[in-house]
Image (cartoon, rainbow, N blue to C red):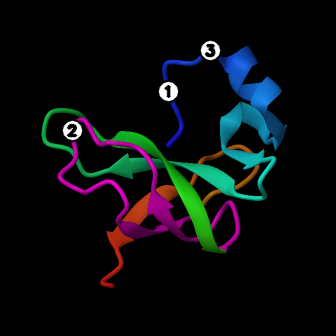
Amino acid sequence: MIDETKNIRALCEEHVSSRALFQSVLHKDGKTWVKVTHFPADEIAGESMWVILVDGDENNGTGTLDNKPIYSDIELGSLIEFADGDEQTKPHFVRVVEQ
């Protein structure tokens, strides 16, 4: 799980490459983390969380939730679908995929 308390510089030094605005990070072990927005949340407009890419690419695909949600009811480790990302926009949450 990515420790969100680390500062940006430390995060970059640990990883091989990263896209603009930290939309995705490729780790040395080959895993790609994607920052996905608009997870459903009651107290705020939507939570953003890191997802480990399983299928697809950094803009559209499926991945395993790798953050412990604060506002969302979705569980750590859930397989989720995300979509509609591009070079300037992070992808958004679509749904939890039934396993």
- Judging depth in this view, the residue of 86 and 96 nearest the camera is 96
Which sits earlier in the primary sequence, circle 1 or circle 2? 1
Dominant SS type (magenta): loop
Q: Check disc 2: other Cα within 10 Å, few if <14, some if 14-19, many if 20+.
A: some
Q: Check disc 3: other Cα within 10 Å, few if <14, some if 14-19, many if 20+.
A: few
Would you name the residue on which mark 1 appears?
Answer: 4
**Label 1 – label 2 distance at C-alpha:** 15 Å
The verdict on residue 57 being magenta is yes
Left or right: residue 63 versus residue 87 is left
In the image, the segment drawn in magenta is 56-83
Residue 71's tag is 2
Kindly state the secondary structure of the residue where label 3 is placed. Answer: loop
Outermost residue to the front: 29
Which sits earlier in the primary sequence, circle 2 or circle 3? 3
Q: Residue at x 57, y 58 (%)?
A: 52
Residue 88: percent from left, percent from top: 71, 43
Q: Residue at x 21, y 38 (%)?
A: 71
Q: Residue at x 24, y 57 (%)?
A: 74
> Residue type at mark 3?
Asn
Would you name the residue on which mark 3 appears?
Answer: 7
Kindly state the secondary structure of the residue where label 2 is placed. Answer: loop
Residue 61: percent from left, percent from top: 58, 73
Residue 25: percent from left, percent from top: 72, 44
Kindly state the secondary structure of the residue where label 1 is placed. Answer: loop
**Label 2 – label 3 distance at C-alpha:** 22 Å
The C terminus lies in which quarter of the figure?
bottom left
The verdict on residue 38 being magenta is no
- With respect to residue 13, does 90 lie above or below? below
